[in-house]
Amino acid sequence: MFKVLEQRMIVPNIHLLRLEAPAVAREAKPGQFAIVRATEDGERIPLSIADWNPEDGTVTIVFMNVGSSTRKLAALKSGSSIPTVVGPLGNPTEIGLYGTVLCVGGCYGIGSIYPVARALKAAGNRVISVIESRSSYLFYWEDRLESVSDRLIHITRDGTKGYRGHVGRLPEIIKSIEEPIHRVIINGCTFLLMRGSDVTRPQSIPTVVSLNPIMIDGTGMCGVCRVTVGSVTRFACVHGPDFDGHQVDWAELLQRRKMYITEEVVPLRTSRCEEHAIRS
Ligand SMILES: Cc1cc2nc3c(=O)[nH]c(=O)nc-3n(C[C@H](O)[C@H](O)[C@H](O)COP(=O)(O)OP(=O)(O)OC[C@H]3O[C@@H](n4cnc5c(N)ncnc54)[C@H](O)[C@@H]3O)c2cc1C
Ligand code: FES
């Protein structure tokens, strides 16, 4: 069992989960994920490792409450335990000396891009972080990102902070930076990854996206996380989750992510009682 040290909502619908998982904390690297299960009979879901401390054996995850499994996690109390935390899984994000790197994060990706930005900064890059949300009150970890970035840029749908709009504003942002951008790394929802890749393609800026297809085992055995990248079939859990955003077959990914949408609604209807049991 893995002890829940902290579980709280940090901004509406986004939660921080800090767990005691020494083996994961010892090996974790930026860009990797863990498979987590809230209850013995629950489903296994992949969640990025947003921070870790090998000394005290803790792992921090930032998750968005979107369905039945994340809802169960959101009901956990500090001091309780969960049965499964498997990881670190997936390949770490490639960290090199590129020059100036744009680290783009939206929703849960604001959390998962943080260790990537930190490692890129430590490797000697100039790091410009760009975070996107619907409104300014949905930003979190700005202090952490500021501490590892040369500049922090905001985009909000409602224009309450920084640029108004969404990741489609990236070309203007890149133009305003007045220095060449050598690499863009994007973490967050599929729309953000896809739109971000679309707008960097005409400028031929290498763009790395952390894909989030549906996963089951996370170790290359089930084939559920199949994606097509550059006309080649890849399993996101073992070949990724990072891929060249300009090569991803986005239409297929979007369609495959919707595969169980009807089934996903059913446990949501019945999960109220389970949540009550977890909370009490
Ligand atoms: C490598 C990787 C890292 C991820 N990191 C994070 C993270 O740090 N924080 C975060 O909030 N989310 C992350 N996700 C997405 C997260 O796994 C899903 O939001 C979660 O599984 C939804 O489960 P649910 O039962 O609450 O919602 P559901 O009701 O099952 O589904 C809601 C939505 O989540 C998608 N989804 C469902 N099951 C999975 C699954 N097993 N894998 C991927 N997507 C699924 C569905 O297509 C649907 O759009 C990551 C996904 C991957 C593949
Ligand atoms: S999750 Fe099963 S092969 Fe990737």
Image (spheres, rainbow, N blue to C red):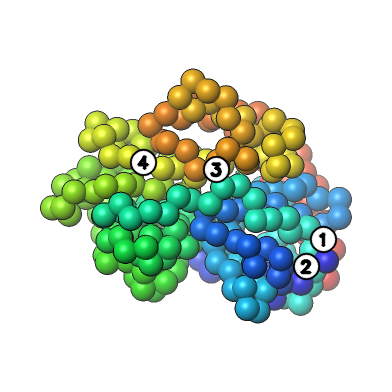
Q: Nearer the viewer, residue 194 or 203?
A: 203
Residue type of the residue flagged with mark 3: Pro
Q: Where is residue 32 shown, x and y percent of the image?
A: 57, 53
Which tag, 4 or 1, sits closer to the chain's start?
Answer: 1
Would you name the residue on which mark 3 appears?
Answer: 241
Q: Tell me how far mark 4 sits from mark 3, CA to CA.
A: 13 Å
For residue 266, say whether it is visible.
yes
Q: Where is residue 232 shown, x and y percent of the image?
A: 53, 23
Which SS class for mark 2? strand
Q: Label 3 neighbourhood size at 10 Å, few (<14), some (14-19), many (20+)?
A: many
Which SS class for mark 3? loop
Left/right of residue 177 with respect to residue 7 in the rendered view: left
Would you name the residue on which mark 1 appears?
Answer: 83
Circles 1 and 2, Cβ within 8 Å, touching? The answer is: yes
Q: Nearer the viewer, mark 4 or mark 1?
A: 4
Name the residue rendered at 41%, 42% in the picture.
Answer: 208
The response on whether ligand 1 sits within 8 Å of label 3 is yes
